[in-house]
Every structure is written in structure tokens, then in C-alpha cells.
Image (spheres, grey):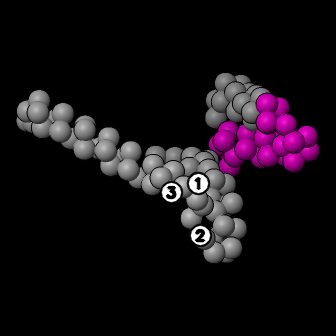
């Protein structure tokens, strides 16, 4: 069991590490030189991170790939994606995907 001072030291240490790593890019007075290929690659970083978080939630269940087409997540994702490409509207995308998910889960018990 950790004592109170060890817990406090751990919290302060993690806070300092977080502060240093996040503030590293804000400390220089001028922009850091970066090759053009790196700048272009960083444009896709948020999309790649989002895909890395969302795709496993869609195609996996309890750490295993889903093995049936009777999964509401697949159809909700397909409908939401189609709606987004049709209308380019985030709220409608969320609502259409949620509506399909609820209809299949509650209505059909998927």
C-alpha cells in the first residue's frame, strides 16, 4: 500500500510530465522547422486516430471479430456513412445511425 506522500509525489510527477510534453510545442517563439512531407502527414493524424478508436468498436465484440451479419452496429454505421456522404450533416449522421441502432436493438433484439 502506498503512503499519502507517495501518492502525492506520483500525482505531481505525472502532472509535470503532462505539462512538459504538452507545452513542448508552445515554448518556442517561432514555428519549429518541419519538412513538407511531415506537415502533410500531420493533416491526416486526427482522422487516423479517430479511425483507430472507432473501427475496433464497430467490428469487434469482447475482443473478438464479430462473426454474424446480425449486428446492429454494422447497419447503423452503413446508414450513418451513407447519410453523411449524401447530406454532409453531422447531426443528421448521428441521428440516422442512432435511429437504425435503436430500431435493430430494441425492435429486433439484435
The answer for how far apart the CA atoms under marks 1 and 2 are is 24 Å
Badge 3: residue crowd in 10 Å (few <14, some 14–19, many ≥20): few
Mark identifier at residue 28: 3
Numbered disc in front, either 1 or 2: 2
Badge 2: residue crowd in 10 Å (few <14, some 14–19, many ≥20): few
User: Between disc 2 and disc 3, whose residue precedes?
Assistant: 3
Residue 33: give x, y in percent of width and height.
59, 70
Magenta residue check for 87? yes
**Segment colored magenta:** 67-93
Q: Nearer the viewer, residue 75 or 80?
A: 80
Q: Which residue is mark 1?
A: 49
* Element carrying mark 2: loop
* Element carrying mark 3: loop
Position of the C terminus, as image quadrant, is top right
Q: Nearer the viewer, residue 54 or 28?
A: 28
Q: Are marks 2 and 3 in contact (CB under 8 Å)?
A: no
Mark identifier at residue 1: none
Residue 8 appears left or right of 50: left
Q: Which residue is mark 2?
A: 33
- Residue 62's place in the image compared with 93, above or below, is below
The answer for how far apart the CA atoms under marks 2 and 3 are is 11 Å
Residue 54: give x, y in percent of width and height.
60, 48
Picture residue at 17% right of the left edge, 35% below the top: 7
Amino acid at each position: 500500500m502506498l503512503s499519502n506522500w507517495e501518492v502525492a509525489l506520483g500525482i505531481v510527477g505525472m502532472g509535470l510530465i503532462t505539462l512538459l510534453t504538452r507545452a513542448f510545442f508552445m515554448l518556442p517563439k517561432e514555428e519549429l522547422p518541419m519538412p513538407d512531407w511531415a506537415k502533410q502527414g500531420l493533416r491526416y493524424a486526427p482522422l487516423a486516430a479517430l479511425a483507430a478508436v472507432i473501427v475496433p468498436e464497430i467490428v469487434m465484440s469482447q475482443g473478438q471479430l464479430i462473426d454474424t451479419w446480425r449486428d446492429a452496429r454494422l447497419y447503423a454505421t452503413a446508414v450513418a456513412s451513407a447519410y453523411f456522404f449524401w447530406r454532409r450533416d453531422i447531426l443528421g449522421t448521428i441521428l440516422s445511425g442512432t435511429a437504425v441502432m435503436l430500431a435493430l436493438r430494441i425492435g429486433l433484439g439484435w
